[in-house]
Amino acid sequence: MTLRPVGRPLQKRLALAYAAGIYGAGVLVLVLVDVPLADVGSTRHVDGPPPAANGAGVGLHRLLAGSAVALAVLVPVALALGWFVAGRFLHPLRAMTATAREISAGDLHRRLDLGEPADELTELGRTLDDLFARLQASFDAQRHFVANASHELRTPLAGLRTLLEVALADPGADADSLRATCEEALALGAHQERLVTALLALATSERGPSHRELLDLAGVAGGVLAARRA
């Protein structure tokens, strides 16, 4: 399966959120500093004449202009810093994604094995490790089932083939011997049918029971004992 390259929308959103926080903090600091200075600069003496024009007004104007420039410069700085912080935050998640893709490619024995610190990403990694362990156990059980099914089916098929080859190789076989051979072949076929039914039931049981029925164990045990005594 070919995976399409994925962009970085989450990093962009985190970067914008961090940048907005940094920019908002900068605006708040400038407001807390400039507003009191502006109030002091605009205060006039009630009892005396207005203060003479001096460098205070010019200094306040420069302060406000400098604050505006600082806010403008803070925008790209906040974006760059937010992008860097978001990238550092998402780096472990990208590493987990790359490792998970390699594991899903066929090597189910590998694990993420995230250590410290014990945070949300570590919990996610442990959950994925548990999932990979269950998948590995499921695939191992499937391989064992296929191997056992192949072995169990090969044995009666080989017996049936041998039986037919012996019957065909006997030029003096009469009707009774051929009939006996056919009866044995039918018995082997019935055995194969029961075996296939049992294998299908075993494969179905791997998914859990579809329905439940009450079973009389006493009756089953009695039937087995009666069959052994007969």
Image (spheres, rainbow, N blue to C red):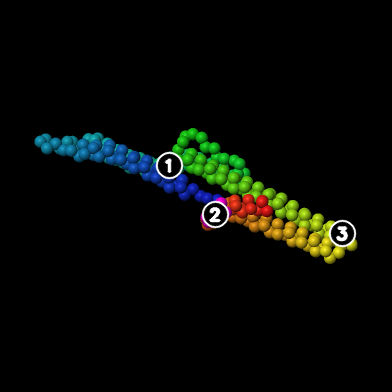
- Residue pointed to by mark 2: 215
Query: Few, some or many C-alpha atoms within 10 Å of disc 2 (few <14, some 14-19, many ≥20)?
Result: few
- Residue pointed to by mark 1: 82
Q: Is residue 135 above or below residue 197?
A: above
Q: Secondary structure at mark 1?
A: helix
Residue type, label 1:
Gly
Query: Few, some or many C-alpha atoms within 10 Å of disc 1 (few <14, some 14-19, many ≥20)?
Result: many
Task: Single out the residue that lies furthest toward the right.
Answer: 172
Mark earlier in primary sequence (3, 2): 3
Q: Nearer the viewer, mark 3 or mark 1?
A: 3
- 227 and 154: which one is in front? 227
Query: Few, some or many C-alpha atoms within 10 Å of disc 3 (few <14, some 14-19, many ≥20)?
Result: few
Q: Does 217 lie within the magenta span?
A: yes
Q: State the separation of the CA atoms marked 3 and 1.
A: 86 Å
Taking the image as shown, residue 50 lies to the left or right of residue 69, namely left
Q: Position of residue 56 (x, y in %)?
A: 24, 35
Q: Secondary structure at mark 3?
A: helix
Count numbered badges in the picture.
3
Q: Residue at x 12, y 37 (%)?
A: 46
What segment is highlighted magenta in the picture?
213-219
Residue type, label 3:
Ala
- Residue pointed to by mark 3: 169
Mark earlier in primary sequence (3, 1): 1
Mark earlier in primary sequence (1, 2): 1
Q: Position of residue 96 (x, y in %)?
A: 53, 42
Q: Residue at x 52, y 50 (%)?
A: 6
Q: Is residue 198 visible?
A: yes
Q: State the separation of the CA atoms marked 1 and 2.
A: 66 Å
